[in-house]
Image (cartoon, rainbow, N blue to C red):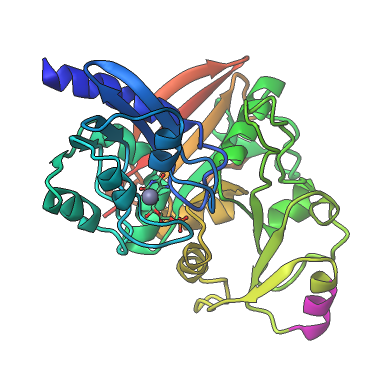
Amino acid sequence: MPQQQHHRWMAQALRLARRGLYSAHPNPRVGCVIVRDGVMLGAGWHEYTGGPHAEVNAIASAEIPTGADFYVTLEPCSHHGRTPPCVDALIAARAARVIVAMQDPNPEVGGRGLEQLRASGIEVITGVLESEARQLNRGFIKRMQRQLPFVSIKMALSLDGRSALANGVSQWITGEQARRDVQFLRAQASAILSSAQTVLDDDPKLNLRLTKRDLNQARQARQPIRVLVDARLRLSGHEKVFSSAGDIWIYTCSNDADRKRRLRELGAQVIEIAVTEAGQVSLVAMLQDLAARGINEVHTECGRRLAGALIEHRLADQMMLYLAPHLLGDQARGGFDLGELTAMDQRKTCRICDIRQIGEDLRLTLNLEQD
Ligand code: AOF
Ligand code: ZN
């Protein structure tokens, strides 16, 4: 029975944590509920970086008696960050028990929060609905543990796996509802990744058009950073990305000072990054740099070359494939440039996590296997 109660309250804390889905970045999404004698007395969540943590919001939400149970989706912090340690607030509230879903992967905390609670006589239970909590903060966890962001590749394909006609035309493969669905993926991401090639071909804005009402948020929606791979600085600055809302970071290996100056004058950050033997931007170096800048989740909208390269280098964690119910034929372009495979064991395999219909199209969520 107690186990069931733990699940019930932690599920409630996770629901609260999810309210930070679009806003908590670069911090994790965290929720907290305070319970005594089977009654929820307080609740809180972490809305934005720099703001109070979930536990502090929960304590502030009501009169909290001593001896209560705190359900938190992430280990309470033990460090002085932008705010004081939550552990101190829980000790001051004379909590009886603290039930957490997962340990904080931030090396500044990393188990010390749990240790301090135990040392002050508070009972600590861990691992309640852990996989759900990990899923919600997979980007934050990957950045903390591997100094890389979680990378998801979105691709719109015809039923026969084509991403554009042979002449490059790709507007539109999927319907309006699928395209609106993508807006929600953009809203969750810290950054949207694309390539100069896609910007030159399609001239997309790559920004967020949903309102705070669409997202059910109290604050104005945050524009994700737009990250563009442009090895040779082919972007002129006349493309729509430069005249639409949101920051732009351009990763290049070009040292053309005039072009850099021009793009910087337009407000873009131009970042020089390591080059591969083939003269391309090193994707791993770029992703490491993004993680160092606090990017947890990268939502990729690009063509077959960048998508293929991310998969080939095992840098992508997930694919969101939108399949439209039509055929574009064998002359049309594929979705993933993986070079020629000559044996079946060279296939890139993935696992289907979710399938649903969005308007007239199908959306597949796929996990890519990583070593
Ligand atoms: C918690 N509760 O609600 C959150 C936690 O510098 P700050 O104040 O923004 O702290 C950020 C770090 O605190 C973050 O990296 C993570 O380790 C932890 N987040 N901890 O106890 C919360 N958001
Ligand atoms: Zn905290």
- Number of numbered discs overlaid on the protein picture: 0
- Magenta stretch, overall SS: helix
Does 356 appear above or below 91?
above
In which quadrant will I find the C terminus?
bottom left
- Residue 322 seen in the figure: yes
Q: Residue visible at 24% across and 48% down?
A: 103
The one nearer the camera, 187 or 219, is: 219
The one nearer the camera, 365 or 63, is: 63
Q: Residue 198 at what x, y percent from top left?
A: 70, 52
- Taking the image as shown, residue 117 lies to the left or right of residue 277, namely left
Q: Residue visible at 19% across and 55% down?
A: 116
Does 256 appear above or below 204?
below
Which contiguous range is marked in magenta?
256-262
* 260 in magenta: yes
Q: Residue 133 at what x, y percent from top left?
A: 32, 36
Q: Residue 333 at what x, y percent from top left?
A: 62, 42
- Taking the image as shown, residue 344 lies to the left or right of residue 176, namely left
- Residue 331 seen in the figure: no
Q: Residue visible at 51% across and 25% down?
A: 363
Q: Residue visible at 42% across and 42% down?
A: 56
Q: Residue 79 at what x, y percent from top left?
A: 34, 61
The one nearer the camera, 298 or 156, is: 298
Q: In which quarter of the image is residue 43?
A: top left
Q: Quadrant of residue 360?
A: top right
* 194 in magenta: no
In which quadrant will I find the N terminus?
top left
Q: In which quarter of the image is residue 57?
A: top left
